[in-house]
Every structure is written in structure tokens, then in C-alpha cells.
């Protein structure tokens, strides 16, 4: 058997052939690899649950202490934009699920199409988010950087205590910021998938990367599913 | 890892439910339910999460191990929140603000 | 293929060390064994750095008013000693060095599940280390490795952000390692290797990985929030803006207590392997030891409040945490009883690995028992913030974890390097380390009980004798640590060539040549017997 070098490891021709089917050398067969990839991404998602969970826990504690201030802060946010973004992100989850399904059934064109649609919807979400952040500067409710609420905004925030309201906005920026960061990373992963799909890298027997990115994307969607009511819908708006 | 292909109709139905629940939670926020605003909002969010997890993320067709892993994640988060909250909720049970104060014995509630 | 020669010091086999040459073959390797060696070099480097800070502290403390540095500098020394030793030595040491090397071998696989994540892990670790070194050089950090707020977030003007970034980044190294191990152990066991046929080292790695995966992310978010507060002067944990410093402590210790189990569980796994081999007996109560590893991992998440008994936590929460802290001691004690029962009527030999393992059992027991003093609310009031705590955790971290690490290095060195080291020197070093360690840290129990506070750059004159003893011990300990560095490096060139199973141990890793070939096994082995089938083996010696 001829040996050849690849990244510091001598590989045999047999292994090179296996590599073309997508099988990595440490696995015995594609099923084992698929199982391992799936378990791996779920374990990673659990770490993300604990990561976001930490800031959700801190948020919950302070919301319990300073409900009035948090309610006031929440009413500064634009519910329509928040709801619109929620719908957009849910839509992107749909298109993501459909792209995994397309990969599963070997439909390359549909796969690429749905991945691109997912990216578009994700981009819409991020665009709206950027606009919302800009609005916070306009309203001067950015902690430390531009904290000078006035007029109607000040009237909403003052009853609960201005400094506690500032605490609300720190959590607003920290939580949505971390979420947005995860979305941006997701967009990068989606782009990578689009490029690979167009080359035909995925077949019905090998599409684990699509599934893995899909699971990540759905998780990011779930975080927003909780962020929306917790940040935008505090108390009643009556 | 699911080998069976989920029909498009299922995905569309789940999506429609998710949109419906989003509209519901937004609408309920405009009603005055007092403390229950939060409860309802979280319940709806929880249902939406279940829909995404079971259908979009294929947990229905996933192995028992994956289900246990996910459950463990939520359980651990619950540990963090519950034991931390236990501290905050029980701080007022000792009437003396400084539990180690030597000037007066704490009066029990 | 090279031909065999009669020269005994020349390798004839292709193995993972000589498979390829050049810095690229090391820095871009995907071979778990090479990555383990990358970690070995890195953690040794950070051990020396952290150890140097400790040496400076002990020199300073020979005088009651301090002999070496300004108090502000002393604060930076103990902070960086803690950060470097915990995050850059203890936590990665056994998992990233021995775990990376051995998990695929013990499981009968060609590599871990995600070799690229493994290499990424090491790079992440190095980047985090660079940030931390930068923070040390650029002025240091004086907030304690515990980063308590609001001092760290609001008032300290040292390099808090830089070191926070370093610790934040390095956490992901831990997470990826744990993730890799969990998936590998679940999905890549060789045919016939059921859970209850696995070596206990793998159970320990699995339990450790659970902690890494579930706990480290909470540290990450906590450090992130701390950095936010430090950078933007916003009051998440600062009372001025309505924040609660205790919330920081809750989030911080939720990870940092289980972190100590990340540091000790792997060492316990190593000890199980060594004891079985050098008593030539199966581990007494295999299942109990395996389950107790997992029990420690789970229970370890329920006790974090015992670090906060005196900082303002509610008394009732303190009661719960105190009770749970007593509970978590039970599985650890069970292990000690099981190891002791293994030794009973075993055929014991006292090579260096066994000396480290026995040292571990004694010193860990002392450290663990003193933990009960601290778990008890009333005594903790007196002992918290004193040198009693310092002695307690050093008995476990150094007397336990470091000795377990050294024992493991000595046990698997022939497999890793293909060479044997001189046992006489190794035994001498182990003895020096044992004596030096006790001389350093036992006086600190007394100092703490007598009331000397920790993290102070000066102390009342009546404590000087004990402090000088401790510093003298530290010198001995330092010498003890240097000796293995010398003979292990020496052995790589001049040591006798090791056969595949020089100790006559059980386990799949000993079925491969020393050092193993890159692909570990020519054919994936099939496992048919239990983990410690020593009764079936006749005599010691190679295979």
C-alpha cells in the first residue's frame, strides 16, 4: 500500500478513499460518525444553555428586586419590532429545517435556496436589531455610554428608580448583544454551508454539517423565543 | 439522528403554531393579568420551545441519550436558579439585618 | 521502512513521535498523542510560572513585616499564583495531558471523536495564557483569583480586563476537551468494551467532562458580566447601581466549586489505575468507585454556597449548603476505603508511581477531612479567611491533584516516550516532594487555626516560626519538583528503551508498542475481559 503524507500524518490510499465519502479516519463507519456529530452538537448546545442561563438567572434575580424599573424599561422598547423580529427568526428556523430536509432528500437546489433564505431572514433580524440599538442612542438610554433619559422616556423610567432602570438596559444590551453575536456566527456558518452545498459536498448519506448548523440555529432561535417576552413584554402595556 | 424525512406539511403546521403563539403572547401582554402576565408569557415561550425542539430539531426521532443530555442541561440550569434564589428568598427570614450581630439577639419570625 | 539494527538505542518502529518531523507537524497535528505533548510542555511552563509566584510569596513571608515586596505587589503575587495554577495548570493538567493521550488508547479507538476541536482546544488555551501573561507583565492583577466584586469590577485599577479575557478564553478550551471526551466515551468504545469493563480512569475522565461542560459556561458568562462592569462602570454587581456583590459570588462559585472536582477526579482516576497495577489486584468495588466519580460530579454542583457562609448569604441557605457539603465528602471517602481494600492482601511493589499514589491517599484524606471543619457553619466562621483554608485546599490540590498528576506521568511515561526513567531518582524525588509538601503546608493549618489571615502581606511576630518552617518546606518542595524535570528529559535520550508493557498492567493502552504508532492500533481490538484482570495475569513484565 503506498503511503502518502497529509498534514503530518501518513495516510493510506484506503483512508484517502474513505475521506472522499466524508468519513473521518477515527470513525469505523458513517453511522458512528453521524451519531458522534449529533451527540457533539447537543452537548455543545447544553453548554450554551448554561452560558445563556447564567445571564438569564442574574436577570431573573434583579427583575424580582426591581420589577417597576424593569417594567418601565421594557415599555421603552418597541413591541412591534420585537414581535416582527420574532416572526422573522421563526421563519428562518422554518427555512433552516427545510434546508436540512432538502439535504436529507438529496435536493441540492432546494438546499441552497433554503440556506440562502435562512441567511436573508437572519439578516433582516440583525438589521432590525441594529435599528433598535440606534434608537437606544437616540433616546439616550445606553448605560454608561449615553445615559441621559429625558422627556417621555424619563417619565417612564423615573418611577422605578433611574439607576435600576440602567440595570435593566445593561441586561438588555448584554443579552441581546450576546444573542446577536451568536446570530452573526450562525450567519458565517450558513455561508460556509451555502458554499459547500453548491459544490455538491452533501449527499443523503452525508449531510451532518447541515444538521449540526441547523441545530445551532434553532437553539439561537429558542434563546430569542425567551428573550422576547422577558425583555419586551414585562408587565402589561395597558 | 433521524433517518425518516419529516413531511413539509408538518413543518408548515409547526411554523403556523409558532406564529400563532407569538401573536398570542404579544396580545396577552396588553391585558392586565397582574402577576400572571409573566407566568403566561413564560408558559407560551415554553410551548414554542417545545415545538422547535421536538419538530425542527428532530428530538422526536433522536436517541434517548440526546434526550437525557438535553434534560440534564435544563436540570442544571434549574439548580443554579433555584439554589441562588433560595438564598435571596430566605435572607429576610432572620429578622436581624446583620445575622452575626452581637448587640441584640435576633427575634424569630 | 527502516531495517532493524543491533544498536539498542535506535528506534526501529514507526511511532507517533518519529512519524513526521518539523514544527508544522507538531503545531498542525491532529494526533491526540502529539496534542497531549503540546499540552505537557505548556502546562509545565505555566506550572513553573505559578510556582515562581509562590516562591516569591514564601520568601516574602519569612519576615513578619514582609521581606521582599510591597503589599500591593504581594496582592498581585497571590492573585496570579492562583489564576495561573488553577486555570492554566491544575484544570488542564491530567485531562489535557494524560486524558488526551490515553482516552483513545484505553477505549480502543484511533483518535478522539473530534481531533480538530482537540487541536483548537490547545490553541485556545495558549491564547488565553498569553492574555494572562500579558496582564502579569503589564502591571499585574490584585483582586484575588476569586475576583470578588465590587473591588474587581469597580475599584481595582489593575489589569482586570486583560486577565478576565484570558480566563474567559481558556474556559472554552476546557469545554471543548470535555465535549470531546463525552462523545468519544459514548460513541467510540471498542467492540466488547462495555461501560463496566472500562478502566476507572475513563470513568473519572467522563465525570470530569460532565463538570467541564456544565460548569465552565457559567464562569464564562460571569467573567463576561464582570468585564462589562469593569469596562463600562455599570453596576451589575456593584451596590452603587443596585447590584448585589453576592450575586457575583453565587455565579462565580457555581463553577468554581465544581472546578475543584475537575482538578481532583482525574487524579483519583490515575490513582485507581496505579493501585490496581502495583497491588496486582482488581480495584475493590469497581462499580462503587465508578459511580462515586459520577456522584462527586453531580453533588459537587450543589455545595457552592459553602464559600459564602460569612459573606452575607442567608443562614438558611447556609444550612442547606453545609449539609450538602457533608454529603459530597461521602463518595470521596468511599473511594479511599476502596483503594485501601484493594491494597489489602495485594502483592504490593513500591515503584515511583505507587509512591505517588500512596502519598495521594494519605494527603487527600487529610485535606478532605479538614474540609469538613470548613463545611461546618460554626467552625467556618472562625477558620474562613485564614491559612487553614489555604492549607486545606493545598493538601487537596498539591498533595492530591499534583501528586496524582506526577504519579500518572511516571506510570505512563514509558508508553508516552518509549523510555524508562531511573526508579531510584524517581523514588527519591517522590520522597522529597512528600516531605517538602508537609513541611510547607502543615504549619499553615496551625497558623490558620491560631488566626493568621490569608492574603495578608504581613503578620503578627508570634507567627514567624511557623511561617519560616513553611517557607523552608517550599524550598524543599521546589527542589523535589525540579528533579523529575531533569531525569524525565534525560530519559528521552538516554533512558532504557521501554517494552510495550513494562509494568505488566492491564488495559488496552499497554497492548500497543511504546510509543504507540500514530493510528494507535493496527486493528481495532476486541475486549473480552474485565478492567483489572490481574488474577489472570501471571507475573509482571512485558507482553
Image (cartoon, coloured by chain):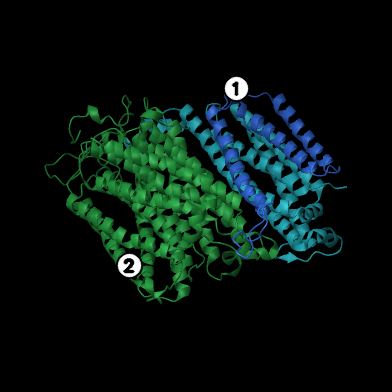
Chain colours: A cyan, B blue, C green
**Which chain contains the residue that carries disc 1?**
B
Q: Nearer the viewer, residue C320 or C499?
A: C320
In the image, C242 versus A99, the foreground residue is C242
Please, what secondary structure does the residue beneath circle 1 have?
Answer: loop
- Do marks 1 and 2 share a subunit? no
- Residue B79 drawn at (x, y percent): 59, 43
Q: Residue at (23%, 35%) from the top-left corner?
A: C345
In which quadrant will I find the N terminus of chain C?
top left
Where residue A140 appears, as percent x and y from the top left, is 78, 63
User: What label does residue B4 carry, if any?
Assistant: 1
Camera-side residue of C272 and C498: C272
Residue C176 is labelled as: none
Query: From the viewer's perspective, is B65 left or right of B8?
Result: left
Q: CA distance from mark 1 to mark 2?
A: 67 Å
- Report crowding for label 1: few under 14, some 14 to 19, many 20 or more residues within 10 A (C-alpha): few
The structure residue drawn at horizontal position 54% and vertical position 50%, both measured from the top left corner, is C254
Q: Which residue is mark 2?
A: C471
Q: Decide: is C492 above or below C463.
A: above
Amino acid at each position: 500500500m503506498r503511503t502518502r503524507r497529509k498534514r503530518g500524518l501518513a495516510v493510506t490510499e484506503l483512508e484517502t478513499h474513505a475521506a472522499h465519502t466524508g468519513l473521518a479516519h477515527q470513525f469505523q463507519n458513517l453511522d458512528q460518525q453521524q451519531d458522534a456529530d449529533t451527540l457533539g452538537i447537543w452537548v455543545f448546545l447544553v453548554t450554551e444553555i448554561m452560558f445563556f442561563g447564567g445571564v438569564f438567572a442574574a436577570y431573573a434575580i434583579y427583575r424580582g428586586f426591581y420589577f417597576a424599573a424593569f417594567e418601565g424599561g421594557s415599555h421603552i422598547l418597541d413591541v412591534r419590532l420585537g414581535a416582527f423580529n420574532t416572526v422573522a427568526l421563526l421563519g428562518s428556523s422554518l427555512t433552516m429545517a427545510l434546508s436540512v430536509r432538502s439535504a436529507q432528500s438529496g435536493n441540492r437546489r432546494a438546499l441552497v435556496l433554503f440556506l440562502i433564505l435562512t441567511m436573508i431572514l437572519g439578516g433582516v433580524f440583525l438589521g432590525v436589531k441594529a435599528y433598535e440599538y440606534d434608537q437606544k442612542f437616540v433616546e439616550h438610554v445606553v448605560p454608561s455610554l449615553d445615559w441621559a433619559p429625558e422627556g417621555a422616556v424619563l417619565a417612564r423610567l423615573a418611577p422605578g428608580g433611574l439607576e435600576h432602570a440602567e440595570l435593566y438596559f445593561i441586561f438588555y444590551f448584554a443579552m441581546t448583544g450576546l444573542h446577536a453575536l451568536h446570530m452573526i456566527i450562525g450567519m458565517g456558518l450558513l455561508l460556509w454551508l451555502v458554499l459547500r452545498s453548491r459544490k455538491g459536498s452533501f449527499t443523503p448519506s452525508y449531510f451532518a454539517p447541515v444538521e449540526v448548523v441547523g441545530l445551532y440555529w434553532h437553539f439561537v432561535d429558542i434563546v430569542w423565543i425567551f428573550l422576547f417576552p422577558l425583555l419586551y413584554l414585562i408587565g402589561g402595556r395597558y | 439522528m433521524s433517518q425518516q424525512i419529516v413531511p413539509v406539511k408538518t413543518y408548515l403546521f409547526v411554523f403556523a403554531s409558532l406564529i400563532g403563539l407569538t401573536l398570542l403572547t404579544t396580545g396577552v401582554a396588553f391585558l392586565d393579568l397582574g402577576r400572571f402576565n409573566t407566568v403566561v408569557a413564560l408558559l407560551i415561550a415554553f410551548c414554542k420551545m417545545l415545538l422547535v425542539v421536538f419538530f425542527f430539531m428532530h428530538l422526536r426521532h433522536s436517541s434517548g441519550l440526546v434526550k437525557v443530555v438535553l434534560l440534564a442541561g435544563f436540570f442544571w440550569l434549574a439548580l443554579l436558579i433555584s439554589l441562588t434564589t433560595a438564598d435571596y428568598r430566605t435572607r429576610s427570614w432572620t429578622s436581624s439585618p446583620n445575622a452575626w450581630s452581637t448587640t441584640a439577639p435576633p427575634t424569630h419570625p | 521502512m527502516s531495517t532493524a539494527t543491533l544498536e539498542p538505542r535506535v528506534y526501529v518502529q514507526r511511532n507517533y513521535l518519529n512519524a513526521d518531523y518539523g514544527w508544522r507537524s507538531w503545531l498542525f497535528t491532529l494526533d491526540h498523542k502529539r496534542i497531549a505533548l503540546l499540552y505537557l510542555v505548556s502546562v509545565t511552563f505555566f506550572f513553573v510560572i505559578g510556582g515562581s509566584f509562590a516562591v516569591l510569596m514564601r520568601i516574602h513571608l519569612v519576615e513578619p513585616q514582609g521581606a521582599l515586596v510591597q503589599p500591593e505587589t504581594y496582592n498581585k503575587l497571590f492573585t496570579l499564583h492562583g489564576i495561573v495554577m488553577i486555570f492554566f495548570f491544575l484544570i488542564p493538567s491530567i485531562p489535557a495531558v494524560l486524558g488526551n493521550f490515553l482516552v483513545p488508547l484505553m477505549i480502543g479507538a484511533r483518535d478522539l471523536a473530534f481531533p480538530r476541536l482537540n487541536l483548537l482546544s490547545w490553541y485556545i488555551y495558549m491564547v488565553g495564557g498569553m492574555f494572562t501573561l500579558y496582564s502579569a507583565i503589564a502591571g499585574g492583577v490584585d483582586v484575588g483569583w476569586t475576583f470578588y466584586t465590587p473591588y474587581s469590577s469597580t475599584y481595582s485599577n489593575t489589569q482586570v480586563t486583560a486577565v478576565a479575557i484570558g480566563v474567559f478564553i481558556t474556559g472554552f478550551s476546557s469545554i471543548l476537551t470535555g465535549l470531546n471526551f463525552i462523545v468519544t466515551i459514548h460513541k467510540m468504545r471498542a467492540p466488547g468494551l462495555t461501560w463496566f469493563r472500562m478502566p476507572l480512569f475513563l470513568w473519572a475522565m467522563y465525570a470530569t467532562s460532565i463538570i467541564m461542560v456544565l460548569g465552565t459556561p457559567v464562569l464564562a458568562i460571569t467573567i463576561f458580566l464582570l468585564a462589562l462592569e469593569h469596562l463600562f462602570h455599570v453596576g451589575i454587581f456593584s451596590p452603587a447601581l443596585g447590584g448585589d456583590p453576592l450575586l457575583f459570588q453565587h455565579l462565580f462559585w457555581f463553577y468554581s466549586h465544581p472546578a475543584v472536582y475537575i482538578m481532583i477526579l482525574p487524579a483519583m482516576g490515575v490513582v485507581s489505575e496505579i493501585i490496581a497495577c502495583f497491588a496486582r489486584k482488581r480495584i475493590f468495588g469497581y462499580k462503587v468507585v465508578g459511580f462515586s466519580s459520577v456522584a462527586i460530579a453531580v453533588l459537587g454542583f450543589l455545595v457552592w454556597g459553602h464559600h459564602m457562609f460569612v459573606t452575607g448569604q442567608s443562614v438558611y441557605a447556609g444550612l442547606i449548603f453545609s449539609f450538602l457539603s457533608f454529603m459530597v465528602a461521602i463518595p470521596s471517602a468511599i473511594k479511599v476505603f476502596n483503594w485501601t481494600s484493594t491494597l489489602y492482601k495485594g502483592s504490593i511493589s513500591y515503584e515511583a508511581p505507587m509512591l505517588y499514589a500512596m502519598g495521594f491517599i494519605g494527603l487527600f484524606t487529610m485535606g478532605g477531612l479538614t474540609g469538613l471543619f470548613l463545611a461546618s457553619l460554626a467552625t467556618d466562621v472562625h477558620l474562613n479567611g485564614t491559612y487553614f483554608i489555604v492549607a486545606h485546599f493545598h493538601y487537596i490540590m498539591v498533595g492530591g491533584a499534583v501528586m496524582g498528576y506526577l504519579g500518572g506521568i511516571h506510570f505512563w511515561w514509558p508508553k508516552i516516550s518509549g523510555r524508562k526513567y531511573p526508579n531510584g531518582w524517581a523514588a527519591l524525588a517522590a520522597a522529597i516532594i512528600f516531605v517538602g509538601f508537609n513541611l510547607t503546608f502543615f504549619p499553615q493549618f496551625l497558623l490558620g487555626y491560631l488566626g493568621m489571615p490569608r492574603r495578608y502581606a504581613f503578620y503578627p511576630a508570634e507567627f514567624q516560626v511557623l511561617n519560616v518552617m513553611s517557607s523552608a518546606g517550599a524550598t524543599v518542595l521546589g527542589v523535589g519538583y525540579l528533579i523529575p524535570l531533569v531525569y524525565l528529559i534525560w530519559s528521552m535520550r538516554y533512558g532504557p528503551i521501554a517494552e510495550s508493557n513494562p509494568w505488566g498492567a492491564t488495559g488496552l493502552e499497554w497492548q500497543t508498542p511504546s510509543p504507540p504508532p500514530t493510528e494507535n492500533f493496527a486493528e481495532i481490538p476486541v475486549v473480552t475481559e474485565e478492567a483489572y484482570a490481574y488474577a489472570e495475569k501471571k507475573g509482571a513484565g512485558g507482553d
